[in-house]
Image: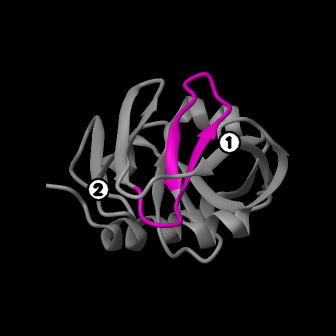
């Protein structure tokens, strides 16, 4: 059974506030408007992370990482976190990320708290299951309204710390 978003936030917000850091993306992303009903499976270097179904106005975003993971972002959040850099072909464009996040690396004690030893399954903000493993990062927007995972390798390829 998956741990809820609420349980994840209750446990990890104090940890992030105490030991986490603030990060920003260090690379451009490519994105285009998603087709409503389109199912997107997010794959990282260590396998399937989660899936999501596009709603009206969502953007399909692709990080410039070795795994090229794709994910959906709602229109309002996308427009607050990205500025267009260059139009590309077939509806795609490259974007400068302007948002910031709070994050913490997950350790064995975090998993043990939830009675898990190798990976923890929790409910992502969009209602689907998401896995997190030791060494991965759990990420919150600056208002701590939600929490989600970014795999360790992709986090290192995508983010840089801006504040301890």
Question: Seen in the image, is 52 located left or right of residue 33?
Answer: left
C-alpha separation, residue under disc 2 versus residue under disc 1: 26 Å
Q: Nearer the viewer, mark 2 or mark 1?
A: 1
Q: Which residue is mark 2?
A: 128
Indicate how the structure is coloured in the image: one colour
| Quadrant of res 99 | bottom right
Q: Residue at x 13, y 55 (%)?
A: 1
Residue 86 in view, yes or no:
yes
Mark drawn on residue 161 = none
| Quadrant of res 30 | top right
Q: Residue at x 49, y 36 (%)?
A: 135
Magenta span: 54-72
Position in image of residue 155 (x %, y %): 61, 39
For residue 134: magenta? no
Crowd class of label 2 (few under 14; some 14 to 19; many from 20; radius 10 Å)? few
The answer to which of 74 and 123 lies nearer the viewer is 74
Q: Which residue is mark 1?
A: 92
């Amino acid at each position: 059974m998956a741990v809820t978003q609420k349980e994840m936030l209750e446990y990890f917000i104090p940890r992030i506030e105490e030991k986490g850091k603030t990060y920003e993306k260090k690379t451009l992303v490519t994105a285009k408007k998603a087709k409503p009903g389109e199912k997107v499976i997010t794959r990282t270097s260590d396998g399937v992370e989660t899936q999501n179904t596009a709603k009206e106005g969502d953007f399909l975003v692709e990080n410039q990482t070795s795994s090229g993971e794709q994910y959906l972002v709602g229109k309002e959040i996308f427009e607050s976190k990205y500025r267009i850099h260059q139009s590309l072909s077939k509806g795609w464009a490259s974007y400068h990320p302007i948002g910031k996040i709070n994050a913490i690396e997950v350790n064995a004690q975090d998993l043990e708290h939830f009675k898990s030893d190798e990976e923890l399954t929790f409910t992502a903000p969009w209602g689907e299951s998401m896995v997190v493993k030791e060494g991965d990062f759990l990420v919150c927007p600056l208002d701590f309204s939600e929490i989600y995972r970014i795999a360790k390798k992709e986090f290192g390829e995508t983010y840089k710390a801006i504040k301890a």
